[in-house]
């Protein structure tokens, strides 16, 4: 059986001093029965590790137990390195959750906890986040903004800039900038909302059911503070969430006013994820991005 990396062992022994650790295929098990998820990254992943840790800390404060609890985060120092190539690499340790897929019951419970706990956690700094977070491999243009309109425009604008830099998406970027100019101010400017904590990448692959408790679990966040409805967008795109998730959610947290623009706001928030998938995976998602833009620009022409 492979040995536990010394820096990971040190991190776990800081909270459990007198345990023996065994490395399992997906986690590290201590003789006390506790399980940990741990990873060591490459030198260029420090920002990603910080982002995940800060997001998990914020989510744990807002909704304890809904996401894995962070145990330790750091960068390997010379005295803890197994070899010189380890120096400066980030490491991360959290509790391990043994999970299966969402069930109808755990999806309803997730909807309730999102609506009443995480999406009730308000920022005192505005919209955005203190550090850049990552949606997949995409570094998001976080910072602090006074309005949701400005925050979302920066997020969408950052994606369009990345697509422009890659080349081959000129028409898509042109339409995207039209959306920024005419749709975002019209749809988001009038909203009277508070910045609340979002998971940011809430698709079914980042959710599960704790097999020990039956409670929902969410992980791999790309968190920031924004409009609560934005957290429902990617859940609508890729499936895996029963209809009861959405109906239960809005029983606890009604749709924002104007309610008759709810679906158009959903289209705008889904656009972010379609564009991100276009950036990450290529032209297969460009058609869906364009279809969303065309719908939005028809509703809000120049």
Image (cartoon, rainbow, N blue to C red):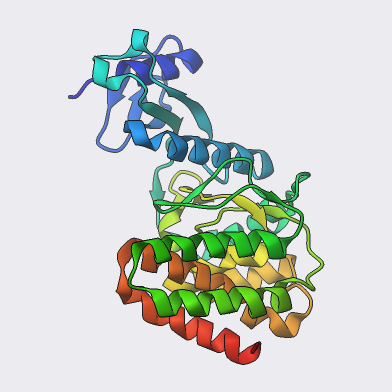
**Which image quarter: residue 187?**
bottom right
In the rendered image, the vertical position of residue 38 relative to residue 22, given as above or below: below
| Residue 172 point in image, percent of width and height | 43, 77
State which quarter of the image contains the N terminus: top left
In the rendered image, the vertical position of residue 291 relative to residue 82, given as above or below: below
Residue 11 visible in the snapshot: yes
Residue 35 visible in the snapshot: no
Question: On the rendered structure, is 125 left or right of 10?
Answer: right
Q: Residue at x 52, y 46 (%)?
A: 133
| Residue 267 point in image, percent of width and height | 57, 78
In the rendered image, the vertical position of residue 185 relative to residue 47, given as above or below: below
| Residue 98 point in image, percent of width and height | 40, 43
User: For the image shown, how many numbered marks are present on the structure?
Assistant: 0
Q: Residue at x 42, y 33 (%)?
A: 46
Question: On the rendered structure, is 197 left or right of 216?
Answer: right
**Which image quarter: residue 265?**
bottom right
Q: Residue furthest left?
A: 1
Q: Residue furthest right?
A: 192
Q: Residue at x 33, y 72 (%)?
A: 168
Q: Residue at x 63, y 63 (%)?
A: 152
State which quarter of the image contains the C terminus: bottom right
Of 39 and 268, nearer the camera is 268
């Amino acid at each position: 059986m492979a040995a536990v990396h010394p820096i990971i062992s040190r991190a776990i022994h800081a909270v459990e001093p007198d345990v023996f650790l065994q490395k399992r295929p997906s986690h590290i098990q201590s003789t006390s029965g506790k399980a940990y998820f741990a990873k060591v990254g490459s030198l260029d992943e420090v920002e990603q590790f910080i982002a995940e840790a800060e997001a998990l800390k914020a989510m744990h404060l807002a909704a304890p137990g809904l996401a894995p609890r962070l145990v330790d985060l750091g960068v390997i120092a010379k005295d803890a390195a197994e070899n010189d190539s380890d120096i400066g690499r980030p490491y991360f340790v959290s509790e391990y959750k043994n999970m299966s897929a969402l069930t109808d019951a755990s999806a309803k419970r997730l909807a309730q906890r999102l609506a009443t706990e995480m999406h009730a956690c308000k920022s005192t700094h505005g919209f955005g986040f203190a550090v850049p977070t990552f949606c997949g491999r995409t570094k998001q243009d976080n910072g602090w903004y006074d309005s949701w309109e400005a925050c979302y425009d920066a997020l969408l604008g950052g994606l369009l800039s990345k697509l422009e830099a890659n080349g081959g998406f000129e028409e898509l970027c042109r339409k995207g900038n039209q959306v920024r100019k005419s749709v975002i101010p019209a749809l988001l400017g009038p909203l009277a909302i508070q910045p609340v904590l979002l998971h940011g990448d809430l698709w079914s692959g980042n959710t599960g059911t704790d097999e020990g408790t039956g409670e929902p679990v969410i992980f791999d966040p790309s968190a920031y503070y924004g409009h609560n409805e934005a957290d429902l967008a990617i859940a609508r795109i890729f499936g895996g969430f029963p209809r009861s998730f959405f109906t239960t959610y809005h029983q606890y947290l009604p749709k924002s006013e104007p309610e008759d623009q709810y679906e158009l706001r959903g289209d705008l928030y889904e656009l972010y994820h379609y564009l991100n998938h276009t950036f990450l995976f290529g032209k297969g998602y460009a058609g869906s991005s364009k279809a969303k833009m065309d719908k939005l620009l028809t509703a809000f022409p120049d």
